[in-house]
Image (spheres, rainbow, N blue to C red):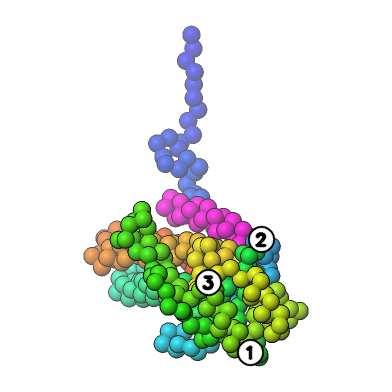
């Protein structure tokens, strides 16, 4: 019986059996990072596509970004639409520049420059995360308030010139025995996330006492602005359709428009924020490895380059998130 002969290829025992050339001339680690980035890009694409379809399905109820994101730190009451979000975006993009400089310094085996530019990148990431938390806080707490209708939509309030008016400016809470329920008071140890002392009756009384006030619906005009009803229509709409007062935004209610906007905003920006937080933590670990000379001893700063790929991806994703939520 003859033994079966197996032809030798000369690649036995090698991790990569495709010859001397590596795929895309990249190391195994960089190739795996590209695989991860590709799969993560598809995940974000699915989320943003779902947001886009939902927005155009509920276009009449969708909030106007300039009205939602119009705050700036230490400038309370100043209408600054998109200014702070633009600043956040600039900080994150600039951190991508410092990451490029850190990678270039690594190619030159310049440890001091790698340390400097990585520190600036980490600082940019931390500032961005803090800014995003501040944006979330303002979105959750709200500014003007609104009234929910029987259909699940909302109505807002404006003056005779169409300028938004906060509910607190014309409604006064009547004396009540009820206060916010806290978990320490029992009832399955659940507590209310918020408690608005204003009732619908308080809002109606305040509205009727101010003849200059109008109701603003979610219906868009030809100019792309929300429709402001006349005084008579406003009274009828408030009295006949109002069911409750909304202050701020969460996963089920949103004083700015469709509740789905809040769900998408928290989920997608939160998912991106988690990526930024993960990137900052990885950068910190690699930063300390650079400080103690780990990569200097290896003779290569490839780890800096690999985390740089991830950081650039996170920055690029934010450009799309920024476009979908704030610009379109």
Q: Residues within 10 Å of mark 2 (few under 14, many from 20)?
A: few
Say which label, 1 or 3, has the lower sequence index: 1
Task: Name above or below for residue 213 compared with residue 132.
Answer: below
- What residue appears at the point 48 percent right and 76 percent down from the top-left corner? 198
SS under mark 2: helix
Mark-to-mark CA distance, 1 and 3: 22 Å
* Neighbourhood count class around disc 1 (C-alpha, 10 Å): few under 14, some 14–19, many 20 upward: few
Tell me what residue is drawn at x 46 percent, y 79 percent: 174
Q: Considering only vertical position in the picture, is 64 above or below 193?
A: below
Measured as percent of width and height from the top left, residue 101 is found at 41, 74
Q: Residue at x 43, y 84 (%)?
A: 73
Q: Main secondary structure of the magenta part?
A: helix
Q: Which residue is mark 1?
A: 211
| Residue 53: image tag | 2
Residue 41 located within the stretch drawn in magenta: yes
> Given the current orientation, which residue lies at the most extreme top position?
1
Q: Which stretch appears magenta?
A: 24-53
Asked which secondary structure carries label 3, the reply is strand
**Dot 3 corresponds to which residue?**
246
């Amino acid at each position: 019986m003859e033994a079966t002969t197996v032809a030798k290829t000369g690649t036995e025992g090698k991790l990569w059996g495709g010859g001397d050339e590596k795929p895309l001339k990249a190391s195994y680690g960089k190739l795996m990072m590209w695989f991860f980035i590709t799969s993560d890009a598809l995940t974000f694409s699915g989320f943003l596509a779902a947001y886009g379809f939902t927005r155009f399905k509920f276009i009449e109820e969708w909030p106007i970004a300039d009205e939602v994101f119009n705050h700036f730190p230490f400038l309370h009451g100043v209408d600054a639409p998109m200014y702070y979000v633009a600043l956040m975006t600039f900080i994150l993009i600039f951190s991508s520049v410092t990451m490029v400089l850190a990678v270039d310094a690594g190619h030159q085996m310049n440890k001091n420059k790698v340390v400097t530019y990585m520190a600036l990148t980490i600082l940019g990431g931390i500032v961005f995360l803090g800014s995003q938390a501040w944006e979330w806080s303002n979105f959750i707490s709200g500014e003007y308030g609104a009234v929910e209708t029987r259909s699940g939509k909302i109505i807002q309030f404006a003056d005779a010139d169409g300028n938004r008016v906060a509910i607190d400016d014309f409604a006064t809470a009547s004396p009540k025995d009820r206060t916010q329920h806290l978990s320490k008071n029992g009832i399955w140890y659940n507590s209310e996330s918020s408690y608005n002392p204003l009732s619908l009756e308080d809002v109606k009384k305040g509205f009727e006492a101010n003849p200059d006030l109008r109701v603003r619906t979610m219906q868009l005009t030809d100019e792309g602005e929300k429709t402001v009803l006349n005084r008579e229509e406003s009274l009828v709409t408030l009295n006949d359709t109002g069911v409750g007062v909304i202050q701020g935004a969460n996963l089920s209610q949103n004083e700015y428009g469709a509740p789905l906007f809040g769900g998408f905003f928290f989920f997608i920006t939160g998912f991106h924020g988690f990526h930024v937080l993960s990137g900052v933590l990885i950068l910190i670990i690699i930063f300390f490895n650079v400080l103690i000379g780990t990569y200097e001893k290896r003779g290569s700063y490839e780890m800096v380059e690999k985390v740089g790929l991830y950081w650039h991806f996170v920055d690029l994703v934010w450009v799309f998130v920024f476009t979908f939520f704030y610009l379109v």
